[in-house]
Amino acid sequence: MSVLFSALGLLVLVIRLSPAIFMRLADGASAKTDSVENDARVSVIIPARNEEANLQKILNSLLRLPFFEIIVVDDSSTDRTQEIAQSFAARENRIRVHAGAPKPQGWTGKNWACQQGALTSTGNYLLFTDADTEHCEGSLSRTLQLNADLVSALPFHQSANFFERLLGPFHLLVFISSSAFSRPKTGSLFAIGQYLLFKREWYFQQGMHEAIKQSFADDLDLAERCVAQGGVYKVETSGRVFKVRMYLSLVDFLAGWRRIFRVGFGHASFVRVFEIFFVIACLTESFKFARATPIETLFALSGLLVLGLAQKRYGNFSWLGALLAPLGIGIFVFVSATALWDRILRRDLRWRGRSYKLSS
């Protein structure tokens, strides 16, 4: 039975991650500069709450791109966020700073900030992006040319220390479990709030962020609504749209992904759960060379090769991380288990210094 599970796991890896591998081999044709149509006026909206450590990097990266306007929404920050944003706005007329109003009852902070930014925008495209991102050269043309009502994008993870460079398998499991390379459909799609590019007309027609004002999975809920209402939703999968370093320590990494997994369970597909099980069987159950049969060893090594090739597109990950795949898998299982436990106990969710009660 373990041989069968391992074979199925390798098949899942090949099918789900082959787009990343083949794109990597053909990377020479990637876009290097942004060229957008004259009528594509993109308003960037950055919800910012206590982002003094990140704001300069994202604004510098955005100013290298042909955005029409950049709106920083200061979400009741208690640090130098507004001061830094104002200093950029004083020397660059494309940047505007909006002092956010207090969060009304029934809204999450980020959704409220995004809603306010959208209402002050004037572009015919709206890009919602987080302050911890750094936007790549050529990224705007990559996403606009998809010609969709809503576009999200796979991130490139900036791994600054040794431990982060071992986590490629973890992030690839996230992609597999969220159907990142599959055709989006309700109940099975990838979306990330760090990059959501809307056609303005569709965003307002969909009800803006007010339609999902209590959501902690705003990215998934907005994408689900787009697909359900007949809109065109696409994911840019090159890994060349934006870079991110979401968490600076292992403790923050575990806590942050625990929160993400918890709210993401409501969008999980049972088919993907089985796929993850088979992948784990391939990379761990068969990863016992002292007792494994030759075919089990072949499956395990082949799976590690697929991981190693695919992970290089989405972060500066080490081959050692692929060889030590059980480490990333163990962290994935641990975060999943703790997130599920939080969901069962209906614990309050804490985020950005605020506490929220969740129904599940």
Image (cartoon, grey):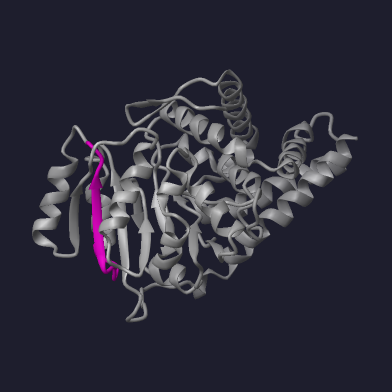
Residue 136 in sight in this render: no
Residue 255 horizontal/vertical position (percent)? 46, 27
Residue 292 horizontal/vertical position (percent)? 84, 34
265 left or right, relative to 251: right
Q: Which quadrant would the N terminus be assigned to in this image?
A: top right
Magenta span: 63-76
Q: Which quadrant would the C terminus be assigned to in this image?
A: top right
166 left or right, relative to 43: right
Q: Disc count in the image?
A: 0
Query: Which image quadrant is residue 297 in?
Result: top right
Can you name the residue that lies furthest to the left here? Answer: 90
Residue 36 in sight in this render: yes
Can you name the residue that lies furthest to the bottom here? Answer: 38
Residue 190 higher or lower than 94, as above or below: above
Residue 47 horizontal/vertical position (percent)? 30, 46
Q: Depth check: give the residue in front, 177 or 213.
A: 213
Residue drawn at the location 78% of the way across and 51% of the way down: 11
Residue 74 higher or lower than 259, as above or below: below
